[in-house]
Every structure is written in C-alpha cells, then in structure tokens.
Image (cartoon, rainbow, N blue to C red):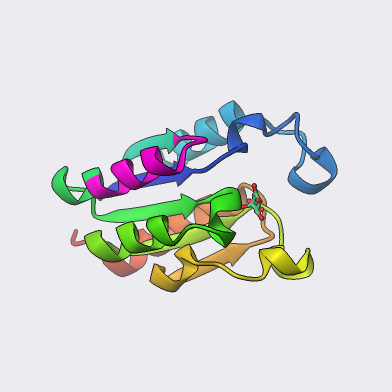
Amino acid sequence: MKILVINGPNINMLGIREKNIYGAETYADLTALLETTAKEHDVDLTLFQSNHEGAIVDTIQGAFFDGTEGIIINPAAYTHTSVAILDALKAVNLPTVEVHISDVSQREDFRQVSYAGKACVKTIMGKGFAGYQEAMLFLLAEYSKK
Ligand code: DQA
C-alpha cells in the first residue's frame, strides 16, 4: 500500500519545542520509526513535513496523481485554522487518518476545532508517536487492496 505521511508546522522542532507536551524525541526519531514500521508491513512510504500551508495543499493534491492510497496527516496548528487543507483532502478523497501527538481534546479552547478532521475517516490523539503507527496499521487493515 502506498501511504503518504504529512506533518505540519513546527513538527520539525520535536525534541526542542514544549517537551512537556510533545516529548524529547525528535522529528528524525519519528521518521525512523515510521520507516521501520513501513518496512515491516511492506508499505511504500512517503514522508513530508512543511511549515507552509500551500506546500501542504500542493502535496495533498499531488497524492491524487501519484498513486497514493492513504494519507496520515498531522496538520499541527493548521488543524485549527485551515479550510484550504480541508478542501484539498476533500478534493483528493483518499482515506485519511488525522493524528495528533498530544491529546488536543484536553488543551486550549482554540484547539477544539479540527477542520482537517472533517475529511478524515479516523482521528488518533494523545498517543505520541505510536499514534502514527496505529494510523498506518488502520489504513492497512481497512483500505489495503492486497
Ligand atoms: C499537534 C496539536 C496542535 O494543536 C499543535 O498546534 C501542534 C501539534 C499535536 O500533534 O499534538 O503543533 O497537532
């Protein structure tokens, strides 16, 4: 199965930013974990991180044309603001799982809205990096054609 993992703004600062919320592990640790998990399950994995909303929209659109079969997305702060990312996810209409490292349901009021989540088949939050692994296994179980 061909899966695209998208991480939004400041996810590249994992291990530096608010360690009490996001932990001490880095973005490189996250990509290594996902690459290992993908290899174990024969997933054709593409990893993308950007701090720019338009670049994320472009990457979602590209997934429609390159054979991607499922998306895992942590839009980070754009979760709570971006209709453009929601519209892009709706446009490509690929099975998408929303992941948040922290449990946003227990955080500030402004984090209680997820635009992207409205286009997702599942949301996983508060499970740290393991949430991305769970998302990958979910897509494989529910959407893999093999
Ligand atoms: C986050 C939660 C968002 O509210 C925040 O803006 C992030 C990370 C998470 O993974 O917990 O940057 O998406």
Q: Quadrant of residue 43?
A: top left
Using the rendered image of the protein, determine whether residue 116 is visible from the camera's viewpoint.
yes
Q: Is residue 53 left or right of residue 103?
A: left
In percent of the image, x 71 and y 62: which residue is there? 103
In percent of the image, x 75 and y 29: which residue is there? 16
Is residue 145 part of the magenta span, yes or no? no
Establish if 49 lies above or below 137.
Answer: above
Q: Which of these two is toward me, 134 or 79?
A: 79
Query: Where in the figure is residue 117, as x and y percent of width and height?
Result: 48, 68
Q: Which of these two is toward me, 57 or 35?
A: 57
Is residue 59 part of the magenta span, yes or no? yes
Total marks drawn? 0
Q: What is the chief secondary structure element of the magenta stretch?
A: helix
- The quadrant the C terminus occupies is bottom left
In percent of the image, x 47 and y 37: which residue is there? 52
In percent of the image, x 52 and y 43: which residue is there? 8
Q: Is residue 43 left or right of residue 135?
A: left
Span colored in magenta: 49-61
Query: Where in the figure is residue 60, as x and y percent of width and height?
Result: 31, 48
Establish if 22 lies above or below 119.
Answer: above
Q: Is residue 61 left or right of residue 41?
A: left
Query: Where in the figure is residue 89, as x and y percent of width and height?
Result: 33, 60
Q: Which of these two is toward me, 70 or 141?
A: 70
